């Protein structure tokens, strides 16, 4: 299912479909893109699994592509924020650096076309479920890629 041009509001589909997807290892503690914190007792890189050392919260899509996205649907308007993903390193080192320099790919895939359609038409969100929640892993998964290797990430 491809959302309408109006729904995309000038954003590429590949970017727009990342807004509102589930967090991994971090979350917003206020409804604001800069009010974030790590979750859990220890930090674990969502990409390589490394614990300890420097970690950071990566916004996916990156904040430079927009700090929020308004999804307009027949069921209402929903404000979607970038997912927060715990990655080792900083924006220039580790897996976080790899994401920023283009060596690490992250995309969201729905388990079925039906689930994707229910996202874009607002059915999933109109049930009172909040965007960025782990509940979305019941409907899809992240695909991480580095070089010629791809792997699935679910919680």
Image: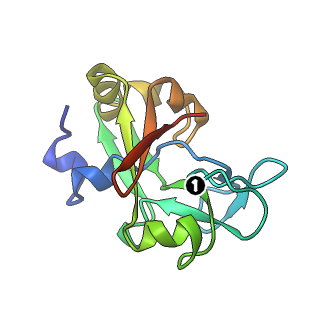
| Residue 152 visible in the displayed image | yes
Circle 1 sits in a helix, a strand or a loop, which is it? strand
Residue 57 lies left or right of residue 54; in this view the side is left
**Residue 74 in the image: above or below residue 112:** below
**Residue 67 in the image: above or below residue 43:** below
Which quadrant: the C terminus?
Answer: top right
Residue at 65%, 50% (x, y): give it: 49
| Residue lying furthest right | 41
Q: Position of residue 88 (x, y in %)?
A: 64, 64
Locate residue 104: give its quadrant.
bottom left
Residue 79 lies left or right of residue 42; in this view the side is left
Locate residue 4: give its quadrant.
top left
| Residue lying furthest bottom | 92
What scheme was used to colour the molecule? rainbow
| Residue 33 visible in the displayed image | no
Which quadrant: the N terminus?
Answer: top left
Residue at 66%, 52% (x, y): give it: 27
Foreground: 89 or 22?
89
Q: Position of residue 144 (x, y in %)?
A: 44, 48
Residue placed under numbered mark 1 in the picture: 85
**Residue 149 in the image: above or below residue 94:** above
Q: Position of residue 41 (x, y in %)?
A: 85, 49
| Residue lying furthest front | 148
Q: How many marks?
A: 1
Residue at 81%, 53% (x, y): give it: 42
Foreground: 97 or 119?
97
10 Å crowding of disc 1: few (<14), some (14-19), many (20+): many
């Amino acid at each position: 299912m491809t959302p309408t041009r109006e729904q995309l509001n000038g954003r590429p589909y590949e970017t727009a479909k990342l807004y509102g997807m589930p967090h991994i290892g971090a979350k917003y503690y206020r409804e604001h893109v800069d009010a974030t914190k790590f979750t859990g007792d220890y930090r674990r890189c969502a990409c390589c699994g490394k614990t300890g050392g420097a970690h950071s919260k990566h916004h996916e899509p990156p904040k430079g592509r927009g700090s929020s996205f308004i999804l307009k649907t027949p069921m209402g308007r929903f404000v979607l924020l970038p997912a927060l993903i715990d990655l080792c390193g900083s924006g220039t080192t580790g897996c976080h650096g790899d994401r920023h320099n283009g060596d690490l790919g992250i995309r969201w895939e729905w388990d079925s076309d039906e689930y994707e359609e229910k996202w874009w038409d607002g059915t999933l969100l109109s049930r009172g479920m909040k965007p960025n929640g782990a509940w979305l892993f019941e409907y899809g998964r992240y695909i991480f890629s580095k070089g010629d290797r791809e792997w699935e990430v679910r919680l």
